[in-house]
Image (tube, rainbow, N blue to C red):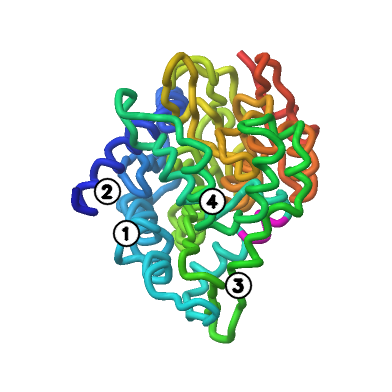
Amino acid sequence: MSSSTRNRILGFFGMLLAAAGIILVSVLLRKDKAESGAGASDTVYGFAMGSTVSVHLYGADTDGTADEVIREVERLDEKVISWRADSSELAEWNRKASAGEEMRVSGELGTAVEKSLELSRKSGGSLDVTLRPVLEVWGIETAKPEEFHVPTEEELRAAAEHTDLAEGAERGRQAGTGKNRQESDSSSGEDVAAEEVIGCRSEEGDTYGLSRTREDITLDLGAVGKGYALDAVYALLQEKEGTAGGVIAVGGSILVFGDKTEVGDFKIGIRDPEGLPEDILGYITFSSGTKKQCVSTSGGYEKYIEKDGRRYHHIIDPATLYPAESGLRSVTVVCEDGLLSDGLSTACFILGEEKAKELLKEYGAEGVLIREDGSIYCTPGIEKQVVFR
């Protein structure tokens, strides 16, 4: 199968899987428009980063701006941060960077890598941007149920040797195959340190020097890319005088900002992890005039496959090399930085409730954590904004 055919297939499945978040946003936006409709554009849809993109803007002059937003997401993906697209900076770095030598990259790519490496360190390696070889062995994102098989210990260890996990993964394996991370010493923060194999140094002229110690180490920014796209489109929209506010969704990451110019608050749905895509437990409210807020959700319900009566989801714990078992069904993170909201939602889902609380506090972020038993925890800074149905 050619790479282009494979990418089209991946894109198709990504579009289906991403529809859940878009459905929640669209339902709420349609309700808002029915209530008023003044000063609001129709929702415009696109497809980028393997996900559906929706753009709903408010203001006196938004014609054409929504299309610009979608093109900006496409540009960031295809030209900067995609590991799949041959034309992107990241893909070129993965192909060409020599071991031990810095390769100059743009500030856009360098900033994304720098923030991701910092989050990797602070989360004890829960967010690992070198994990692609292990994800490929699992194949949960694209496998058909009849073709899927659970990787063997040997397959997982072999794949981990091509990440920065060679030693950390082995310690995680010793903690027990697929063991709950909350019961493992491997979540201490010293098992995985991406900065040991990936170097990222800012240079003059808004560029970075990006390096790796081994050429078999590759970077995959999929866990932060959709959130980073929110940062890019927000910067674009700040230059548009006719845009008063908006709601932009890239897959499961959502940007809310500005004046709503309609009755009521902005409302972002919280999906029921056990329900259909359109089933929501409640929503997070943001008042009109809110500053930039980014909302990202990670959960085991997003992408999974069932085999022999067991469900395997796509969020792999680097400490165990198995789908995370942290006692959480989903994590929604709210903060001003889109990349961090996206990365934190993944890291916190893997870490489990107690360590997630610590990490959110360190970043000044808020969160809604849905536990396996269906109960919900909201951080103090956001609990008054969460309304349950």
Label 1 is placed on what type of residue? Ala
Q: Which residues are magenta?
A: 117-121
| Residue shown at the point (53%, 37%) measured from the top left | 315
The residue labelled by disc 4 is: 160
Distance from Cα at disc 4 to Cα at disc 1 = 23 Å
The residue where tag 2 is placed is 7
Q: Nearer the viewer, residue 344 or 217?
A: 217
User: What's the residue type where badge 4 is placed?
Assistant: Ala
Q: Which residue is mark 1?
A: 85
In this view, the mark in front (4 or 1): 4
Judging from the image, what secondary structure is the residue with disc 2 in?
helix
- C-alpha separation, residue under disc 4 versus residue under disc 2: 24 Å
Q: Quadrant of residue 355?
A: top right
Q: Nearer the viewer, residue 288 or 74?
A: 74
10 Å crowding of disc 4: few (<14), some (14-19), many (20+): many
Of labels 1 and 3, the one closer to you: 3
Q: Which mark is residue 283?
A: none
Q: Amino acid at mark 3?
A: Gly
Earlier residue among tags 3 and 2 = 2
Residue at the image position 43 percent from the left and 61 percent from the top? 81
Q: Is residue 135 above or below residue 164?
A: above
Q: Which mark is residue 199?
A: 3
Q: Earlier in the sequence, mark 4 or mark 1?
A: 1
Pointer 3 local density, CA inside 10 Å: few below 14, some 14–19, many at least 20: some
Instruction: Categorize mark 1 by other alpha carbons within 10 Å: few (<14), some (14-19), many (20+).
Output: some
Local secondary structure at mark 1: loop
Label 3 – label 4 distance at C-alpha: 19 Å
Write the residue at 38% across / 53% down.
69
Q: Residues within 10 Å of mark 2 (few under 14, many from 20)?
A: some
Tell me residue 271's x, y (percent).
Answer: 53, 23
Please name the predominant secondary structure of the magenta segment in the image. Answer: helix
- Residues at circles 1 and 2 in contact by the CB criterion of under 8 Å: yes
